[in-house]
Image (cartoon, rainbow, N blue to C red):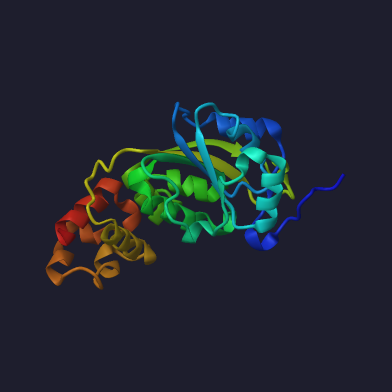
């Protein structure tokens, strides 16, 4: 019997078929009675079927592919009215109050999805996400690492990041050409008291956009000339900790 739906390469679809891996991903989630949970990109329902069995959880999903929405609602009647058929990048916040997010995220939009999580950050308690391994490592890496960059600083300013485990290519149909990894993001309640997230994002992006240059050269377009005399400006972006970036942001944006 063939699959009751088609695979759309344009949407970066790779379906997880390894049941043990599906259960492992779901068991990484901190489940509490009465929690609200959003699954991003349920696809063929690989982890959905386990998520909807969780007791006391208010579940919703966002899926852009109509064929998958029809299939899921037919296969799991519980999902009637619980799937938002929309592009995640254009979606409104799906719940009032706090919620958690889980998903085998489409690799071609994994960075934009993380920026969406940042946009919803005040309400997002936890994220369990599968990414291309390099993206997962990037989010989790620290200063001085080759992978340390924009996503590392931005996500770690608001979340505690933990790299959980690798996912082998053979767990998928079709097997992707890249390795995958699952990470956990736990909201740490804005410990740095960043009041203007947009300005903080601009600062971090501008600093890393020319990562070979010193901050003095990289940031001259957005900071006043006297700010560029600070000794820290002779360092490169990858040498700064999250705390250093926050200090810079507070010094020149407040």
Residue farthest bottom in this picture: 221
Identify which residue is drawn at 29% across, 39% down.
Answer: 189
122 versus 238 height, above or below:
above
Task: Give residue 252's position: percent from left, percent from top.
Answer: 16, 61
Asked whether the viewer can see residue 148, the reply is: no
In terms of depth relative to the viewer, which is nearer, 166 or 159?
A: 159
Identify which residue is drawn at 47% across, 57% down.
Answer: 91
Quadrant position of the C terminus in the picture: bottom left
| Left or right: residue 173 compared with residue 252 | right
The mark tally for this picture is 0
Quarter of the image holding residue 24?
Answer: top right
Task: Give residue 101's position: percent from left, percent from top.
Answer: 48, 42
9 versus 243 height, above or below:
below
In terms of depth relative to the viewer, which is nearer, 57 or 193?
A: 57
| Left or right: residue 146 compared with residue 78 | left
Asked whether the viewer can see residue 174, the reply is: yes
Residue farthest right in this picture: 1
Quarter of the image holding residue 125?
Answer: top left
Identify which residue is drawn at 30% across, 47% down.
Answer: 242
| Left or right: residue 173 compared with residue 114 | right
Task: Give residue 132's position: percent from left, percent from top.
Answer: 57, 49
Identify which residue is drawn at 42% across, 45% down.
Answer: 95
């Amino acid at each position: 019997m063939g699959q009751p739906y088609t695979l759309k390469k344009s949407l970066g679809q790779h379906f997880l078929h390894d049941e043990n891996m599906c259960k492992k991903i779901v068991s990484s989630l901190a489940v509490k009675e009465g929690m609200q949970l959003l699954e991003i990109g349920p696809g063929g329902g690989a982890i959905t079927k386990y998520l909807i069995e969780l007791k006391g959880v208010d579940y919703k999903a966002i899926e852009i592919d109509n064929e998958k929405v029809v299939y899921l609602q037919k296969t799991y009647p519980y999902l009637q009215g619980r799937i938002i058929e929309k592009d995640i990048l254009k979606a409104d916040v799906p719940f009032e109050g706090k919620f958690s997010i889980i998903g085998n995220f489409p690799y071609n939009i994994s960075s934009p999805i993380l920026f969406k999580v940042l946009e919803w950050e005040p309400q997002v308690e936890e994220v369990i996400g599968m990414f291309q391994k390099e993206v997962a490592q990037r989010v989790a890496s620290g200063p001085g690492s080759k992978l340390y960059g924009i996503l590392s600083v931005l996500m770690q300013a608001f979340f505690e990041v933990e790299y959980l485990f690798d996912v082998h290519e053979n767990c998928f149909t079709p097997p992707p050409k890249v390795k995958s990894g699952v990470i956990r993001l736990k909201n740490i309640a804005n410990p740095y008291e960043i009041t203007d997230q947009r300005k903080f994002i601009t600062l971090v992006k501008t600093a890393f956009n020319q990562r070979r240059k010193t901050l003095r050269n990289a940031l001259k377009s957005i900071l006043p000339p006297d700010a560029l005399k600070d000794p820290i400006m002779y360092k490169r972006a990858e040498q700064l900790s999250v705390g250093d970036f926050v200090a810079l942001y507070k010094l020149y944006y407040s």
